[in-house]
Image: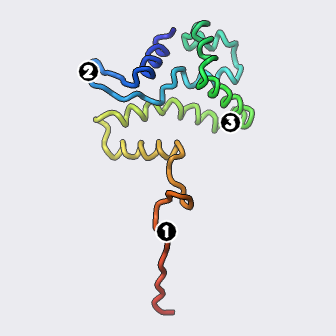
C-alpha cells in the first residue's frame, strides 16, 4: 500500500490527525482514501490501468481493494458520466483543479496563521460550493417573510 493511501486510510479510521507536537487536528474530508484524480484518469483511458496506478504508487492488490470501495466506484462512475456528458472541457479541467485545491483550502481554514477574514471567506465558499447555502425562495431562505411598501406621495 502506498504511504499516501495508508496515511489517508489511517486518518479516515481515526478521524483525527495529530501533529508531531501533539496538537490534534480534525480529519480532512477532502482526503477520500484514494487520489482524487485517479477515477478521472482511469475513465479517460489515456493509458493502461497498470501505468496509471504506477504513477500513483498503487499496486495490484491495493487497486483490487479500491474497486470494491463504494466511494471509489461512485467516483469512477461519476467521472465516466462527466466525460460522457461534457467531454474534456475547460469546466472539467477546472473541476479537477478544484478537487486538489480543497486540500489547500482545508489547510488554510485549519491554520491559525491564516487571517480570520480569509478563513471566514473560505468557509463561506466551501458551504456554497457544497450546495448548502439556502436558496432565495425555498424553506430556510434568509430574509423577511413579508414586505411592507409605504408610498408617500405621487
Mark 1 or 3, which is nearer the eye? Answer: 1
First along the sequence among labels 1 and 3: 3
Q: Which mark is residue 145?
A: 1
Residue tagged 3: 89
> Which residue occupies 58% across, 36% down?
94
Q: Earlier in the sequence, mark 2 or mark 1?
A: 2
Q: Secondary structure at mark 3?
A: loop
Dot 2 and dot 3 residues touching (CB under 8 Å): no
Residue under pointer 2: 22
Task: Kindly state the secondary structure of the residue where label 2 is placed.
Answer: loop
Q: Nearer the viewer, residue 4 or 77?
A: 77
Total numbered labels:
3
Classify 128 as above or below 143: above
Q: Are marks 2 and 1 in contact (CB under 8 Å)?
A: no
Mark 1 neighbour density, 10 Å: few (under 14) some (14–19) many (20 or more): few
- Cα distance, mark 2 to mark 3? 44 Å
Residue 37: give x, y in percent of width and height.
58, 24
Q: Quadrant of residue 62?
A: top right
Sequence-first tag of 2 and 3? 2
On screen, residue 110 versus residue 125, left or right, reads left
Mark 2 or mark 1, whichever is nearer to me? 1
Applied colour scheme: rainbow
Horizontally, residue 75 falls left or right of residue 136, namely: right
Residue lying at 37% horizontally and 24% vertically, measured from the top left: 16
Quarter where residue 111 is shown? top left
Residue nearer the viewer, 120 or 140: 140
Whole-percent x, y for residue 125 in the image: 46, 45
Amino acid at each position: 500500500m502506498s504511504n499516501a493511501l495508508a496515511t489517508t486510510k489511517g486518518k479516515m479510521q481515526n478521524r483525527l490527525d495529530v501533529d508531531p507536537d501533539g496538537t490534534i487536528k480534525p480529519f480532512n474530508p477532502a482526503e477520500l482514501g484514494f487520489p482524487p484524480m485517479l477515477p478521472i484518469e482511469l475513465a479517460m483511458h489515456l493509458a493502461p490501468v497498470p501505468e496509471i496506478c504506477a504513477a500513483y504508487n498503487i499496486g495490484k492488490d491495493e487497486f483490487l481493494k479500491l474497486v470494491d470501495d463504494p466511494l471509489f466506484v461512485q467516483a469512477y462512475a461519476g467521472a465516466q458520466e462527466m466525460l460522457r456528458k461534457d467531454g474534456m472541457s475547460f469546466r472539467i479541467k477546472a473541476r479537477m483543479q478544484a478537487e486538489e485545491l480543497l486540500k489547500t483550502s482545508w489547510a488554510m481554514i485549519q491554520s491559525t496563521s491564516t487571517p480570520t477574514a480569509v478563513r471566514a471567506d473560505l468557509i463561506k465558499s466551501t458551504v456554497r460550493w457544497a450546495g448548502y447555502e439556502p436558496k432565495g425562495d425555498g424553506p430556510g431562505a434568509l430574509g423577511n417573510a413579508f414586505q411592507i411598501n409605504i408610498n408617500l406621495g405621487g
